[in-house]
Amino acid sequence: MMKSGPAMGVRLKHASMRPAARILVIENNDSDVFLLDRALKKQEFRFELVHLLDGGEALAFIRRQGAYVDAAIPNLILVDLNLSKYTGEDILHEIRSAAHLGGVPVCVWSSSRSRRDEALLKDLGVSQFITKPSGLDQFMEIGKIIKDLLAGPRAG
């Protein structure tokens, strides 16, 4: 009985010290979100993935409209550049003009490798640009990139 007590205490202490990181993912490809979820789980940290399928939903979330009036502020926002209804660029402009999201790091992922995209994103204050990989192993590395991004602001 003594052996199970301390182990339980350590787990509870770990859980209470580090609240789950809330990651908002604005992505219209369910397969990419599934792989992202797997990549994050492989990093063994607590997270909650909030998935919005298109630019219209993203704008409602950012503007705190409809179902998103009381939505919690995420710790990180991950935006795909190629969305339906609105572009990722439209979403980034809206995020940057939303005062309540001012301190939230924004990461963009895209299949685009365009230097123009990367330059534009730097102008919009994007923390990280990730090119979506084609292979599963490379996709799993995205989990570490995101975990590191989340660790940065908390440590600073």
Image (cartoon, rainbow, N blue to C red):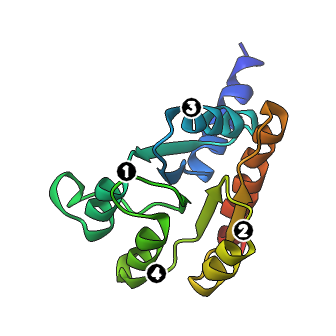
Depth check, front residue: 75 or 91: 91
Q: Position of residue 52 (x, y in %)?
A: 39, 48
| Looking at the image, residue 34 lies above or below residue 92 | above
Reading the image, the residue beneath label 2 is: 114
Reading the image, the residue beneath label 1 is: 54
Q: How many marks can you see?
A: 4
Looking at the image, is mark 1 or mark 2 earlier in the sequence? 1
| Looking at the image, residue 127 lies above or below residue 23 | below
Disc 1 to disc 2, how far (Cα)?
22 Å
Q: Which amino acid does label 2 sit on?
A: Ser
Q: What residue type is labelled 1?
A: Asp
Q: Do the numbered discs 4 and 3 sit on residues whose CB atoms are within 8 Å?
A: no
Question: Tag 4, which secondary structure?
Answer: loop
Q: Quadrant of residue 45?
A: top right
Q: Nearer the viewer, mark 4 or mark 2?
A: 2
Disc 4 to disc 2, how far (Cα)?
26 Å
Q: Nearer the viewer, mark 1 or mark 2?
A: 2
Disc 4 to disc 3, how far (Cα)?
29 Å
Reading the image, the residue beneath label 4 is: 102
Question: Tag 2, which secondary structure?
Answer: loop
Reading the image, the residue beneath label 3 is: 31
Disc 1 to disc 3, how far (Cα)?
14 Å
Q: Do the numbered discs 1 and 3 sit on residues whose CB atoms are within 8 Å?
A: no
Q: Where is residue 10 in the image (x, y as percent from the top left)?
A: 70, 36
Question: Tag 1, which secondary structure?
Answer: loop
Q: Which amino acid does label 3 sit on?
A: Ser
Residue at 30 percent across and 60 percent down: it is 61
